[in-house]
Image (spheres, rainbow, N blue to C red):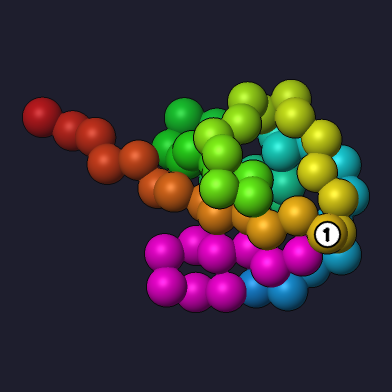
Amino acid sequence: MIITIGTKKIRSNFNGKISELIKKLAFSREEVLVRVNGKLVPEDAKINSKDNIEIIKVVFGG
């Protein structure tokens, strides 16, 4: 699997839930959205090593 975070690409053999991947990458669920194979998915979606993952950092503030 290739995980894209901004312009950075990471190779991984992760299998599990999006929520577990977010924790492993040291993000909180409130600060990111995740696309799997081009589609936005909920944090309880399961992924495997054949998926392409894109982590999108959410910008918020006042």
Q: Give the residue at mark 1.
A: 50
Q: Position of residue 62 (x, y in %)?
A: 10, 29
Q: Position of residue 23 (x, y in %)?
A: 68, 44
**In this view of the protein, which residue sits in the foreground, 17 or 47?**
47
Q: Position of residue 41 (x, y in %)?
A: 61, 31
Is-magenta flag for residue 42?
no
Inspect this view and state whether residue 43 appears.
Answer: yes
Q: Overall secondary structure of the magenta stretch?
A: strand
Residue at image point 77% right, 65% down: 1
Magenta stretch in the rendered image = 1-9
Callout 1 secondary element: loop
Residue at image point 44% right, 48% down: 56
Residue at image point 73% right, 74% down: 11
- Left or right of 24 in this view: 37: left
Inspect this view and state whether residue 28 appears.
Answer: no
Please tell me whether residue 55 is drawn above or below residue 34 in the rendered image.
below
Q: Amino acid at mark 1?
A: Lys
- Left or right of 56 in this view: 43: right
Is-magenta flag for residue 6?
yes
